[in-house]
Image: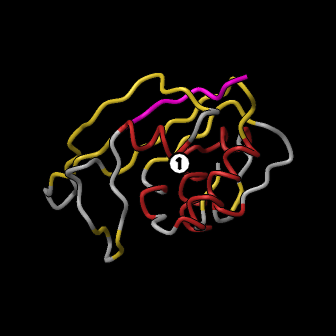
Amino acid sequence: MVDVSDFALRAARTRLGPRADLVQWVTTDARELRLPRKVDLWHDRAVFHFLIAAADQEAYLASLSHALRPGGHVVLATFGPQGPENCSGLPVERYDSAKLARRLGADFDLVRSLEKLHTTPSGTAQQFTYCVFKRRA
């Protein structure tokens, strides 16, 4: 599991209890991630939409390409086209499945997508786009 926050990783590790030893825990920025071996699944719930600069997106996608084996899957959840323009005081990029597919590029095939309303703890509804991609072999 990768997160930029040691605190978040410690909390997740605690929740897993003894099973936490089965997970490799990595504290780093997704734009700088370089794993020692390829993985079968890349799951991102609400990171990519915070990367609004092209250079940040390219760094993230380079990490993804380095980490994911051919034939592996990517699950991305971003704010949808009618989602908020800002979150936690930061600007975000909003995506539909076609825009995400274009951004990932020709090495990835869209397997499935859906748009769903997520209700925050404060009761605000936010549109999300969820996509599953498969990396071409």
- Tell me the SS state at disc 1: helix
Q: Residue furthest bottom?
A: 89
Q: Residue furthest right?
A: 36
- Residue at the (44%, 43%) spot, across then down: 100
Q: Considering the image in quadrants, where does the C terminus appear?
A: top right
Quadrant for residue 92, please give it: bottom left
Between residues 31 and 120, which one lies in front from this camera angle? 31
- Residue at the (23%, 54%) spot, across then down: 83
Residue interval drawn in magenta = 130-137
Q: In the image, residue 57 lies at what x, y percent? A: 56, 59
Q: Amino acid at mark 1?
A: Arg
- Residue at the (64%, 48%) spot, across then down: 1
On screen, residue 134 versus residue 28, left or right, reads left
Q: Residue 25 colored magenta?
A: no
Q: Residue 135 colored magenta?
A: yes
For disc 1, the marked residue is 15
Q: In the image, residue 134 lies at what x, y percent? A: 59, 26
Between residues 64 and 44, which one lies in front from this camera angle? 64
Q: In the image, residue 21 lies at what x, y percent? A: 73, 43
Between residues 34 and 104, which one lies in front from this camera angle? 104
On screen, residue 66 versus residue 55, left or right, reads right
Between residues 61 and 9, which one lies in front from this camera angle? 61
- Residue at the (60%, 29%) spot, across then down: 73
On screen, residue 67 above or below 50: above
Q: Magenta stretch: dominant SS? A: strand
On screen, residue 31 above or below 37: below
On screen, residue 23 versus residue 14, left or right, reads right
